[in-house]
Image: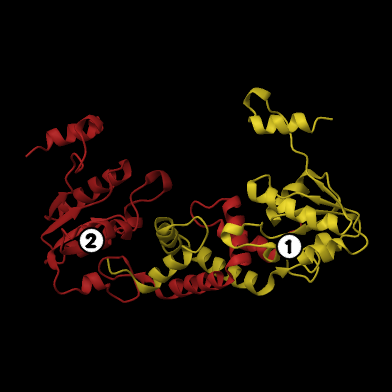
Chain colours: A red, B yellow
């Protein structure tokens, strides 16, 4: 089909979104042009505006429109505890627990040598500077419990301990509400080892 | 988490894409801002450009940047046959077969009373005008073989026949390459009924 050129360009642009193939991209383009042009224009503006105004917080490296994000500015927070997470979504999950009142450092990624992502790409130096400000007493590593998240925690832990900081890791164990019969063996083994 | 406002707006805008929930939208926003700002700006431009320049072909109603689309302009096509499809994607599938050299009419939807989509919303009057131009001899209904597609074909067929046009429907039957044992019974029943 000789498709309108602007439509082809739009489909190509939509394909750059993660998890969107050529069929989904075509479906999205069709939906926007046929049923929701207002939504399309709104998305265009939101993209432009976010690209122009969102950058990284000087302290915790998360996305913000200010020099320092609202969480880091919050005077009621315990500045002696610094929790290291991979992404803003992870930070958001921790915040929703309402169990942590310290500050965060967001890596915006994880170590992944196979993808060429090394310590500099996740801001190791920035983290060392941040954690070494003299106020932070404890660094809590809350990277994911995947192979890459564990490797990241290991490397960060080594480097932070070398600076004399107290480093802890989120506890591994049996998830709340689960029956032992259905919990994977590695998790049970960890829970046994870390029993208290 | 006190998320950057521009980021929240972007996530909301991405959620308007079909099949995108809040988790996917957050992941897309994170990916674009962290790893592909050039892609984000490109997408914004493509959306804007498509909204400004893409409209409907005066003859077949598909998306085009011209008054009449390239397919309708193609002088080598058989103007006596008009194939009615639901979407440009369906038209594209038919084109790829290289088995049809007539023209198309793209409904840009299907009858769906439950969603409030009636004959006017799929351009029935425009189709009747188009098919009644005195050149079209045969209208081939190639709407999908779903409940809604079949209902659409039925309604269009009635109205087109009332104007004295020859109306045909794509054949139903056993798909190429399939074994009878694994073909659903409704399809086999249709294939028996329409045997030739």
The spot of residue B81 in percent (x, y) is 87, 53
Evaluate if marks 2 and 1 touch, with contact meaning CB atoms under 8 Å apart. no
Q: Quick check: can you spot residue A1?
A: no
Q: Which one is nearer the viewer's eye here, B176 or B196? A: B196
Query: Which image quarter is the C terminus of chain A in?
Result: top left
The spot of residue A20 in percent (x, y) is 53, 53
Position of B134 compared to A164: left or right? right
Q: Image quarter for residue B7? A: bottom left
A180 w.r.t. A150: above or below? above
Q: Which one is nearer the viewer's eye here, B96 or B60? A: B60
Respond whether the residues carrying marks 2 and 1 are from the same subunit.
Answer: no
The spot of residue A52 in percent (x, y) is 45, 75
Q: Is mark 1 on a helix, strand or loop?
A: loop
Decide: few, some or many residues near mark 1? Use Cα within 10 Å; few <14, some 14-19, many ≥20. Answer: many
**Distance from Cα at disc 2 to Cα at disc 1:** 48 Å
Find disc 1 in the rendering and name its residue.
Answer: B62
Position of A159 compared to A122: left or right? left
The subunit carrying tag 1 is B
The subunit carrying tag 2 is A
Label drawn at residue A95? 2
Query: Which image quarter is the N terminus of chain A in?
Result: bottom right
Going 31% across and 65% down the picture, which residue do you hit?
A: A62
């Amino acid at each position: 089909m000789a498709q309108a050129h602007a439509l082809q360009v739009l489909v190509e642009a939509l394909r750059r979104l993660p998890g969107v193939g050529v069929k989904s991209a075509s479906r999205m383009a069709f939906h926007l042009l046929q049923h929701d042009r207002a939504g399309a224009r709104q998305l265009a503006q939101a993209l432009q505006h976010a690209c122009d105004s969102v950058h990284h917080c000087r302290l915790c490296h998360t996305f913000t429109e200010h020099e320092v994000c609202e969480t880091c500015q919050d005077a009621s927070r315990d500045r002696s505890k610094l929790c290291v997470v991979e992404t803003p979504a992870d930070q958001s999950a921790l915040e929703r627990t309402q169990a942590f009142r310290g500050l965060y450092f967001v890596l915006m990624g994880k170590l992944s040598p196979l993808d060429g992502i090394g310590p500099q790409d996740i801001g190791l130096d920035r983290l060392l500077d941040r954690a070494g400000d003299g106020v932070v007493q404890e660094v809590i590593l809350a990277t994911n419990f995947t192979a890459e998240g564990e490797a990241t925690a290991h490397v960060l832990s080594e480097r932070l301990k070398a600076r004399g900081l107290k480093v802890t890791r989120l506890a591994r164990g049996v998830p709340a509400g689960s029956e032992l019969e259905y919990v994977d063996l590695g998790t049970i083994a960890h829970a046994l080892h870390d029993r208290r």
